[in-house]
Amino acid sequence: MPYRSSISVYTDGACDNTGSGNVGRAIGLGIVLQVGSEYRILEAVHGEPGTSNVAEWLALYRGLAHVAALANTPEFREPGATIVMRLDSQLVVNQMNRVWLVNDPTLANYFRGCVEMESMIAKLGHHISFVWIPREQNDIADQLSKIGRRTLDVKRPSWERFNTLDDVRTRLESLYRYATASDD
């Protein structure tokens, strides 16, 4: 059965800010996909050194890549879905909405990659938008990005399906315990 409902993708990037300048030793990415009332935790990814802005852009790109992959599955091939990318980064949202210019050359590369992914999804007949949300409404992706930042081996996407946010939070607690076990 094709998804005809709205799809929300929550993304967030985290940086530990303990490196030199504003470059942290590691970044983490968190991506959560919501289809209708069903939640899927997609990723908690550990990344190389980078800035908070780089982490936010990479999280958005990976979220868009998951949407593009899902759009090629039989259950999602029918055009017309509304995809809402939800981020707590005003910078990324305003740049993707072409409100603000992208002046930094490094971020411009990420911007171009995201625009290409956006265009590919639109060519499949889906409507995509970028919406800023307060950090409190992005807590699941935020927690995943922090787990990813701390842990080298939480890289593979999890396609677990959850019916409630409480179920998602319970899974996050176990992931967090795993990620911080080496801190003890």
Image (spheres, rainbow, N blue to C red):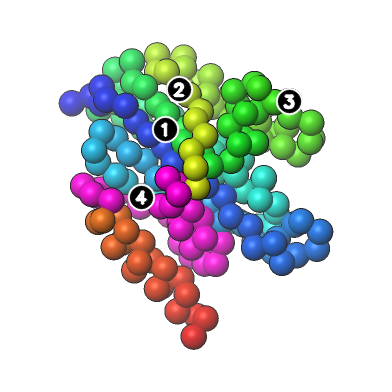
SS for dot 4: strand
Give left or right: position of 15 versus 61. Answer: right
Q: Earlier in the sequence, mark 2 or mark 3?
A: 3
Q: Is residue 91 magenta?
A: no
Q: Is residue 180 above or below residue 136?
A: below
Q: Position of residue 77 (x, y in %)?
A: 31, 21
Residue type highlighted by circle 2: Ile
The CA distance from mark 2 to mark 3 is: 20 Å
x 70%, y 54%: residue: 50
Instruction: Please provide the residue range marked out in magenta.
Output: 136-165
Element carrying mark 3 = loop
Q: Which residue is mark 2?
A: 128
What type is the residue that disc 3 sits on?
A: Leu
In which image quadrant can residue 76 be found? top left
First along the sequence among labels 3 and 1: 1
Residue under label 1, please give it. 67
Residue at coordinates 32% horizontally, 27% vertically from top-left? 6
Q: CA distance from mark 4 to mark 3?
A: 31 Å
Given residues 131 and 66, the one toward you in this image is: 131
Which residue is under mark 4?
41
